[in-house]
Image (tube, grey):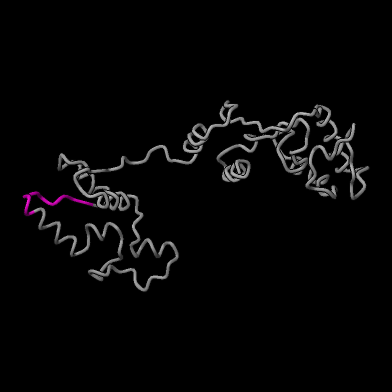
Amino acid sequence: MIASSINLLHSNGVIPHHTLTRKVSDGKSTAFWHDLWLGNFSLKVKFPRLYQADPNKNCLVRDKWNNGWVWNWSRSITRGIILDQFNELLHLLESVHLSENPDTWHWDLANSKIFTVKETRLYIDDALLPDHLPETRWCRFIPKKVNILSWRALRDRLPNRWNLSRKGIDIPSLLCPVCFSFPETNFHLFWDCNVASAIWKFVFRWVDIHPPNILDLTDLFNWLDESTSIRF
């Protein structure tokens, strides 16, 4: 499970492929061609022509050893690129000495030799999460669902008609179902729609505040931050 997860993270450019490698001892649980155990690449990647010439592509390291390395090829490897690859493979294998101890995993991430979920999670978060996200607005005096709605609106994650159409969902009309005048976007719903505008005007008259110049939702929430001691 860990190995497959590492492969997925590597394919997305998050964790180097050589982070998790096999340390071969008896060779009975390490795939000769597929596992990362000799260098920074699997042998099937490093020596593709040899891999294609091996009829037993799922063999273990131990399967290739009988008081010496044993080879069984489906084609001749006596010349050309495939011979060069074979000679390079033999050179690499000179440093390999099998024993009776079981094979183990070797972890190497950010100079850490011991695998921990915490350190790995921190590394992944640093690689994937943006460095500069706006501060989450949260007011403990209003219902959680209102806080969540505000957060989703600022992140443009509400399923309005405009966003649904951008996701490829067939929408009969992009127009606001309340005023039928402009596309239904977050800004339109919360500020620009005739109904929303009428509500805001009522609020401004009620609290005796001059209407601000709002260009987007960020402006609106920033204005709310500046106009009240309650933080949203």
Q: Nearer the viewer, residue 23 or 176?
A: 23
Look at the picture and state if 110 lies above or below 225: above
- Residue 111 in picture, x, y percent from top left: 58, 25
Look at the picture and state if 202 lies above or below 97: below
Q: Is residue 213 magenta?
A: yes
Q: Is residue 202 magenta?
A: no
- Residue 219 in picture, x, y percent from top left: 24, 48
Residue 191 is left or right of residue 36, and the answer is left
- Residue 92 in picture, x, y percent from top left: 81, 31
Q: Residue sitting at 27 percent across and 43 percent down?
A: 137
Residue 130 is left or right of residue 27, and the answer is left
Residue 19 is left or right of residue 206, and the answer is right
**Quadrant in the picture for the C terminus:** top left
Query: What is the quadrant of residue 172 in the picture?
Result: bottom left
Q: Nearer the viewer, residue 50 or 212?
A: 50
Residue segment shown in magenta: 205-214
- Residue 113 in picture, x, y percent from top left: 60, 26
Q: Residue sitting at 89 percent across and 50 percent down?
A: 74
Q: Residue sitting at 6 percent across and 53 percent down?
A: 206
